Image (tube, coloured by chain):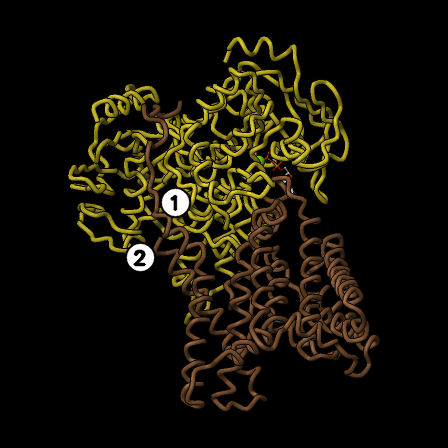
Amino acid sequence: MPMPRDPADLPKHGRRRPRAAHIVGQNIGLILAVTILFLSIVIFAGMFLVQQDRLPGSFEITSTVNNTMPLALAAIGQTIVVLTRGIDLSVGGVIDLTNALAAIFLPGSVLHMIIVSILIIVAGGLAGLVNGLIVGLGRLQPIVVTLATLSIFQGLAIRVLPQPGGSVPTGYTEFLVNTSGPTALLFLGLAALGWMVLRRSRLGVDLFAVGNDEPAAIALGVRAMRTKILAYTIGGMLYAVAGLFLAANATGGDATTGDDYTLTSIVAVVLGGVNLFGGRGSAVGAICGAFITTMIVNILFFAHINPLYQSFYEGLFLVIAVVFGGLIGRLVRRGS
Amino acid sequence: MNSPHAATAESVAVLGAQTVSKAFGGVQALRGASLVLGAGEVHGLVGENGAGKSTLIKVLGGRIAPDSGTVLLDGQPVRLSGPADSTRRGIGTVFQELTLLPWMSVAENLLIGREPRFPLGLIRRGALAGEAEAVLAGLGIHHIDPRALAAEVSLAERQIIEIARVIIRKPRILLLDEPTSSLVEREVEWLFARIRELRSQGTSIVFTSHRWNEITSIADRITIFRNGKEVGTYTAIDETEAITLMTGRRVEAMYPPLPSVPANAPPALAVSDASLGGAATFGFSLAAGEILGIGGLAGQGHRELFTGLFGAPPLKRGTIRVDGKPIRIARPSDAIRAGLGIALVPEDRKGEGLLLPLPVRDNLTLPILGRISTFGVIRGGEEARMSREMISRLKIRTPSAAQPVGTLSGGNQQKVLVGRWLLAESRILLLYDVTRGVDVATKHEICELIARLAQEGKAILFYSSDTEELAHLCHRVLVLRGGRVAAELTPPALTAEAIVSAAIRDADAA
Ligand SMILES: Nc1ncnc2c1ncn2[C@@H]1O[C@H](COP(=O)(O)OP(=O)(O)O)[C@@H](O)[C@H]1O
Ligand SMILES: [Mg+2]
């Protein structure tokens, strides 16, 4: 026989931690990313001041923003894929391909440029769709699938543009990466807004649900396969936009210029506090992660580190960020 | 059990399974199983672990498609295309494995798919917690913080959220697969109050549990499963008969006869001035060959007593004597040296005690590795022999000693823990709720094992969340209340009712 019923049923009260404690605890990755970004900006500004006798001005800010745009966009795409507990190594290939397409097909009237840009974004989406379909329908490891498609997209890019070249109209460059001011921040604002909308949509909930626990999400009625396919597709579209920004920056195309973005987008995602095991993270974090990555390069430049060692230091910072982020996360959870 | 609902149950069937079969690889989980759920009834589903209960519930909940057979909804055959489909048709399911999303908040989990929205359909994230708070309060749940992550709340709280999430969708048919396995009594009572409420509103409910008292106190009809198929559906059946049907073996009685305690056996373990936090203290002594039960309302510090005697962590206060000599138990190694062994059911059946990925053998011999090693190298032959003997002595159901312990059923994992302490030559066994969540047949075996161990002269301190078990398996039961021994019960006064009423009296006085 059961033990007697407590007249009060379930407890009438329970411990409520202050709202701020929840917000801090649940966004510790983002908070850390913002802090690191702030510190890296301070360090950079300090080095700049020492060596140039002035603080970085409009020119430095504008070029930093413009240089970071492709990475920030690629990192947002990578975030959406990583949230579903996936990973996308084909980022570099998609950027190569869309960058090459842009350099060849963009020149023309304004209307022409708009249509071509849209088509290039669609092409990126198709590339992502291929990834998503193979991962989703084939139930294959994302890391293997996207490693294979990375090579395929790189190959296609070389076919499209065997030699660096082509051209991007000046008007197009000025529109995306205005050199006289950091207007590209507007596009980042738009991206952040898009993220906030996504976060509040059914798809957003599904992305997080699938990354949290796929079988559980399926039991809750989430269409996991569809969600993953969409994640890779949206990712591909964002890499395409990154490819367009890269072309605008360089005012031309190069079928290998995107290769680095496979690694750096993952670095930015980790620095931005997005959990590689899925289900936790934000695009705002990824944007911060992208800027941190750029600031690290800037700092290395001012520290007169041989550019050949750049990836060595990037890797080092990645390891530190992963270890440190994990430690902080654990401490916060213990303290709660 | 003979409630008025049982009569109507036969007439209107709202949900049924007809000769449903399902195989996973080589394992035939269901072999032509059928079930008829009547309108407005609570239908208890019982059977040993692996009998196919959960598989049937997954079929009815639209989570897996049967290989053959039909699901009938309101008498019509339906093909459930997925969990969303069955939810749409008014079937709400709490699956045995929880489906909470760990890194999302309680509120997000509770309201997933029906979040408060802005006019354009975007989710009002800021309003989630408030809405969840209100929804939970409507179900009598006030103690769970809706802003906490699901991973941050206790297992029982997760289970309650899971149940709440299904109930607030107002299903016509509610399927509950072992919803009480991680709940304590007051939480079970809360759930039963909700179930009765829903039944009175016409909801039809399937309920599975390994605790027989729960089944008899809530179910209008009981279907017994064995080996992937129903054995029969009953409106009244007693426990031993049910166990016989579940196992297919004749079981004389759930509880074995108790061996007598040798007269004036010296106390093996004596505890005095022990405190479980408050100012009150208590003491007791336990003789070799005796099974001493500890009873009382949940949350009275039973667990702290057991882990305290094992030094994990030590008791806040109290003197412990083993064989009359006072000893200090500051950590588990002190307890092991003094001849104490502990088996307790960890809250989530993982961690605490067993190394799940490691073989049964390694788990058994863990504390005695020093004894069976030469210069730090384990003598493999001896280790194999000892673990083989223990496996057959305790009837541990495992294909081999090399099987990872995590793949065994809960009851058999418990036996491995007990076996470990027997190998370590523990003379005092602290058994904390070892039959919790274990199917009745294995529970029966564990009870027999405990009686046999007492006969061999082990001193056994025993706690169970099942009062019936305390009353039948113990020579003596101490009912704790407010850190004091409120009653000491011995036969013939030792009955489940007496334990409960001692606890009620205490609760009223408190
Ligand atoms: N997903 C699965 N894969 C392989 N075997 C499974 C799976 N689900 C259940 N089984 C097997 O099917 C049988 C029935 O399991 P289950 O329905 O969970 O039983 P119960 O709920 O009655 O304990 C068991 O032998 C179990 O091991
Ligand atoms: Mg089950």
Quarter assignment of residue A260: bottom right
> Is A231 on the left or on the right of B307, as rendered?
right
Position above or below: B74 against A55: above
Q: Amino acid at mark 2?
A: Ser
State whether residue A45 is above or below residue B103: below
Q: State which chain disc 1 sits on.
A: B
Chain of the residue under label 2: B
Image chain in yellow: B
Per the image, label 1 sits on a secondary structure element best described as strand
Give the residue number, with chain letter if any, for mark 2: B333
**Mark 2 residue's CB less than 8 Å from ligand 1:** no
Residue in the picture at 70% in, 61% down: A237
Under tag 2, what secondary structure? helix
Q: Which residue is mark 1?
A: B343
Drawn side of residue A294 relative to residue B458, left or right: right
Is A191 in front, or is B179? A191
Q: Nearer the viewer, residue B408 or B13?
A: B13
Residue type indicated by callout 1: Ala
**Image vertical order of residue B493 relative to residue B99, above or below:** above
Q: Is mark 1 within 8 Å of ligand 1?
A: no
Q: Work out which quarter of the rendered image holds the N terminus of chain A and state it.
A: top left
Q: Where does the image place residue A190, in percent across and percent down from the top left?
A: 59, 59
Please state the quadrant of the image where ligand 2 appears: top right
Q: Quick one: label 1, few (<14), some, or many (20+) residues within 10 Å?
A: many
Q: Which chain is brown?
A: A
Q: Position of residue B193 (x, y in %)?
A: 44, 22
Q: Nearer the viewer, residue A310 or B101?
A: A310
